[in-house]
Image (spheres, grey):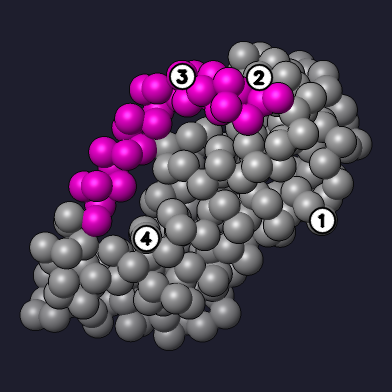
Amino acid sequence: MSTADIFKLCGLVAFFVLMGVIVWLVWPYIGMLFEPDGLEKALDEVRGNGFVGVLMLLGLQFLQIVVAFIPGEAVQVAAGALYGPWLGALLVLVGCVFSSAFVFMLVSKLGAPFVHAMVPAKYIDKLSAFEQSSKFDTIVFILFLIPGMPKDVFTYIVPLTKMPLGKFLVITNVGRIPGVILSTYAASGLVNGQIIESIVIFAIAAAVAILAIVFSEKIMNRLGDKLGK
C-alpha cells in the first residue's frame, strides 16, 4: 500500500469518526426539529456548545480540504446556518488557511510521487505548464475564484511549483472568499426566513459550478491561451 493510499485510508477513518462524534452530540436535538420553531431551537443549542461546535466545524473543513472527498459547499452551508454569514465565513476561511498550510508542508515533505497518487495527472500537467507563465499567480487566483473548479486538487498541486508558502496561502484563500461568503450568506438566509433570495443564490451558484465542472478543461485551456505567456 502506497503512502497516498494510507493517507486516504486514515482520512476516511478520521472522517467517519468525526461524523460519529457529530451525530452523537447532535442526536439529542434532532427531536426539536419536529417542534414549533424547532430548527431555530436546535441551531441555538448547537451554537450553545461554544468552542466544541467551532472545533467540529473546523475539523470538517480540515478533512474537506486535506482528504478532498467532502463537498466544500456542505461545510460552508453548515457554517452559515450555525454562525451567520460573516462569522461562518470567517471560520471557514480560518479552516482553509490552516488546512492549506498543512497540505503545503505535507507535499513539501512527501514530494511529487505522493501528489501523483492523490490527484489526476491531467491537472498536474496543466499546472506545470502554467508555471512557465509570468502570470502564474493570476492563473492560480482565477482557478480558486471560479466556483466548481477542483480547488482541493489544486491545493495539492501548487505546492509542487516554486510558489512560496506565504504567497500560496494568500492567493488561494483570497480566491476562495467570494464563494465562501456567498454560501454562508445564502445558508444564513434560509435559516432566517429569506427563502426565495437564498434559493436564487444557491441556484445561480449551482449553475455556475456545474458549468465550471463540465467545462473545467476548456476553462483551463482558455486561461493558458490568455495568460500562459
Q: In terms of sequence position, does the residue under pointer 1 or pointer 2 come before the other? A: 2
- Which dot marks residue 126? 2
Q: Amino acid at mark 1?
A: Gly
In the figure, is residue 31 to the left or right of 71? left
Q: Amino acid at mark 3?
A: Lys
Q: With respect to residue 83, does 185 lie above or below?
A: above
Of 25 and 136, nearer the camera is 136
User: Do callouts 2 and 3 mark residues in contact (Cβ within 8 Å)?
Assistant: no
In the figure, is residue 148 to the left or right of 154? left
In the figure, is residue 44 to the left or right of 89? left
- Give the foreground label among 4 and 3: 3
Q: In terms of sequence position, does the residue under pointer 2 or pointer 3 come before the other? A: 2
- Which dot marks residue 166? 1
Spatial distance from mark 1 to mark 2, Cα to Cα?
Answer: 22 Å
- Which dot marks residue 74? none
Q: Where is mark 4, residue-wise?
A: 182
How crowded pointer 3 is (Cα within 10 Å; few <14, some 14-19, many 20+) is rated as few
Q: In terms of sequence position, does the residue under pointer 4 or pointer 3 come before the other? A: 4
**Residue at coordinates 21% horizontally, 62% vertically from top-left?**
198
The image quadrant of residue 192 is: bottom left
Q: x, y percentage for residue 68?
A: 57, 37
How crowded pointer 4 is (Cα within 10 Å; few <14, some 14-19, many 20+) is rated as many
**Residue at coordinates 38% horizontally, 76% vertically from top-left?**
84
User: Do callouts 1 and 2 mark residues in contact (Cβ within 8 Å)?
Assistant: no
